[in-house]
Amino acid sequence: VITVVLVFIAAVLLAALSGLIGDEVRGWLELVPRGILRLVAMRLPASLRQAVYNEEWLPELIFILRNAAGRPITRLITGTWYAVSMIRSAGRVSRSLRRLRGEDRSADVLVPGWGVLSLLVFLMAWLLGRDAFPMGNELAPPMEADLEPLPPLPPRKNVF
Amino acid sequence: MVQPFEDLGLTPKMADVIKMFLEDPAEPRYGFELMRATGQPSGTLYPILAKFEKHGWLTLGTEDIDPKKEGRPARRFYRITGAAVTSGRLQLAELSERYRPPVGIRHRLRPEGGAL
C-alpha cells in the first residue's frame, strides 16, 4: 500500500514538475526573438524607436508569439525569423522614414547591421560555451602545482 | 492624423502592397501579414507603408483590444483611404496593361508554361 501511495505521489509530483519545466522552457524560448529584436532596435535612431520598435515591431512580434500558442517550435522559428529579418532592414527602414519625415540623418549614430550580428554571435557563443571554456582559477592553475616534482614512476617489470 | 491625398506613381513592389489592400478595402492590414502575403522583406515593406501613409494612401490605426485581457500590446494596422482605392485600381489596371504580353506572343503561350 505504501509503495502504491509513494508511486502515486511521485507521479503527481512529476506531472506538476513537467508542467513547470514546460512553462519555464516556453518562457525562455520567447526571450530569444525578443532579445534579437531588442538588439535590432539599437540600430534605430532614438527619434524612431518609440514609433517603430515599441508601437509596431514589438506588438507584432508578441502577437506572433501568442498566435502560435501551443506550438513552441513554430513560435520560436516564426518569431526568430521575424526578428532576424529586421537586422538587415533596420538601417534601411530608419533611413527611409527619416527621409520621409525630413529629419536630420546625422543627429544619431546608427549601430551597423554587422555590429548587431557580431553581438548576437558573441552572446550565443558565451551562452553555449560557458561550460566548454571554464574561466577563472580553472583556466590558470596555481604555479606551485607546476613546480612540484613529479611522483616517481613504478618499477618496470620485465615481461619477457 | 490623416494626411492629404497625393497621387503616387506605383512601382511593381508598391503595387503588390496596394493590391493586398484593394482585395478588401475595409479590412485592416498588419505589417507581418503583409510581409508574408507579398513576400517582401521588412526593409522593403515598411518604407513603402510609410510612403503610402505620408501621401494619404493609408491611415494608421491601433487594434481595439484590451491589452491586459489579451496579454499582449495592441498592434498597429493600416487601412486604405477612399481616394487611394480609386487611384490604386486605376494604376493597377494601367500596370497590368503595361506588362501584358503582346498579342502575337500571347497566343503562342500555354497557361501552364512553355510555348505551343
Image (tube, helix red, strand yellow):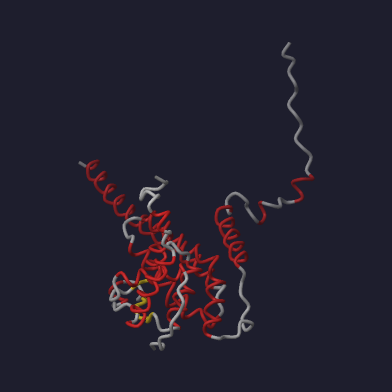
Q: In the picture, residue B101 is in which quadrant?
A: bottom left
- Residue in view at x 40 percent, y 74 percent: B91
Which residue appears at 50% of the width and 70% of the height? Answer: A38
* Extreme residue toward the top, this view: A160
Residue name at image x 45 percent, y 73 percent: B10
Q: Is residue A98 left or right of residue A142?
A: left
- Viewer-nearest residue: B48 or B110: B110
In the figure, residue A17 lies in which quadrant? bottom left
Q: Is residue B54 above or below residue A147?
A: below
Q: Is residue B29 left or right of residue A6?
A: right
Residue with the most extreme front position? B104
> Could you tell me how many numbered marks the image carries?
0
Residue A97 vs residue B114: left or right? right
Instruction: Check the picture and name the quadrant holding the N terminus of chain B.
Output: bottom left
Choose between A156 and B86: the one closer to the eye.
B86
Residue A70 placement (x, y as % from top left) = 31, 57
Question: Residue A98's image quarter?
Answer: bottom right
Q: Residue furthest left?
A: A1
Image location of residue B7, percent across then percent down? 43, 82
Image quarter hosting the C terminus of chain B: top left
Q: Residue at x 37, y 82 (%)?
A: B59
The image shows residue A78 at horizontal and vertical percentages of 41, 59
Closer-to-camera residue (B58/A123): B58
Tell me if residue B78 comes above or below residue A14 in the rendering. Answer: below
Give coordinates of residue A34: x percent, y percent: 46, 66
